[in-house]
Image (spheres, rainbow, N blue to C red):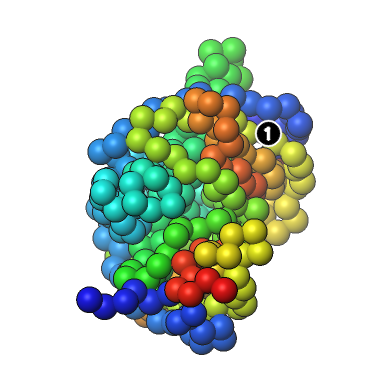
Amino acid sequence: VTTPRAFEDFEAGVDYDLGRRVVPAAEIAAFATEFDPQPMHLDPEAAQASPLGGLAASGWHTTALMQRMLVDGLLAGTTSMGGAGYEHVTWHAPLRPETTLSGTATILDKRISRSRPTMGLMRTRIVLKDAATGTMILEAIAMLICGVREPG
Amino acid sequence: MWFLEDLPLNARISLGSTTVGEADILRFGRDYDPQPFHLDHAAADASHFGGLVASGWHTGAMFMRAFVDYTHRLAEEMRSRGEVPARLGPSPGLSDIRWPKGVYAGDTLAFATTPSSKRPLASRPGWGLVIFDNLALNQHGTTVMTFRAGIFVERRS
């Protein structure tokens, strides 16, 4: 039996690689149809005339992709207890169909919750880029919660 | 949507409600947030949530759907009065996102938004920025998500 990685095993200041993920046009359309059916995500002409300047993913799709990359690259197989919230999410550039995203997560600081000593809090900066151009697509600061292996 | 100049501030707008299906929680979890408490009943029951819960980003996406549906209804009402609705642009970002309680299968969420400030944008002629303060409540009246969103809204001039 392997012990899952816990709060104690995460290091502040280290850049964790979240890997890469391709965003197909069909997935952009499917997500927008279900959750954000605005013409700028679904209709090429309306998208061209909008401030996005062409078809782009819903911002909520981009955050969902960030979460998937965060789970696959950092939180899977750990004592993750979810997220308390985010200080901010900033969409820097539109996410175009067929883009390959790359991601990085950096724990800015970590501490054990005073009120719930079994929980560790990790203030974490997440950046998603277009892997081909290096253009920043999204930047966010999360408060992640991870179980403590040996609560003091 | 109202044009920036006409958009009323500080009045809460009800965006309607939606019931969260278990299959939807599982599908969103599998696609975008594959953690045990979003994927598996037994693991979720044993977790600190005590049951299967929706990804926080799923709750946000459901909010967005309610918001978009509301803007479509508003646009229809405006057209029926002979008015031209303003376009909504994209959002530059969100802030102060909190998920104070879990969203469980079968919960009915009510969504609301309050435009709290607005200003024209020098950098984007024809557009302004509106800050919306947003809220999701469950059927017990408990807050399950709060956040602020900036959204670009078309100007009259």
In depth, the one of A149 and B125 nearer the eye is A149
The residue at the far front in this view is A152
Q: Is residue B30 left or right of residue A58?
A: left
- What x and y, as percent, mark residue B71? 53, 29
In this picture, is A95 found above or below B89? below
In this picture, is A2 found above or below B68? below
Q: Residue A69: name its quadrant.
A: bottom left
In depth, the one of A105 and A35 nearer the eye is A105
Name the residue located 65 percent from the left edge and 29 percent from the top edge. B2
The residue at the far bottom in this view is A14
In what quadrant of the picture does the C terminus of chain B appear?
top right
Say which residue label 1 marks. Answer: B114
- What x and y, as percent, mark residue A120? 55, 68
Q: Is residue A75 left or right of residue B116?
A: left
Q: Secondary structure at mark 1?
A: strand
- What x and y, as percent, mark residue A51? 54, 53
Q: Residues within 10 Å of mark 1 (few under 14, many from 20)?
A: some
Q: What amino acid does circle 1 point to?
A: Thr
Disc 1: host chain: B
- What x and y, as percent, mark residue B75? 53, 24
Q: Is residue A125 left or right of residue B119?
A: left
In what quadrant of the picture does the N terminus of chain B appear?
top right
Q: Is residue A55 left or right of residue B88?
A: left
Name the residue located 69 percent from the left edge and 44 percent from the top edge. B131
Q: Is residue A59 visible?
A: yes
The residue at the far top in this view is B81
Name the residue located 33 percent from the left edge and 46 percent from the top edge. B45
Name the residue located 44 percent from the left edge and 52 percent from the top edge. B48
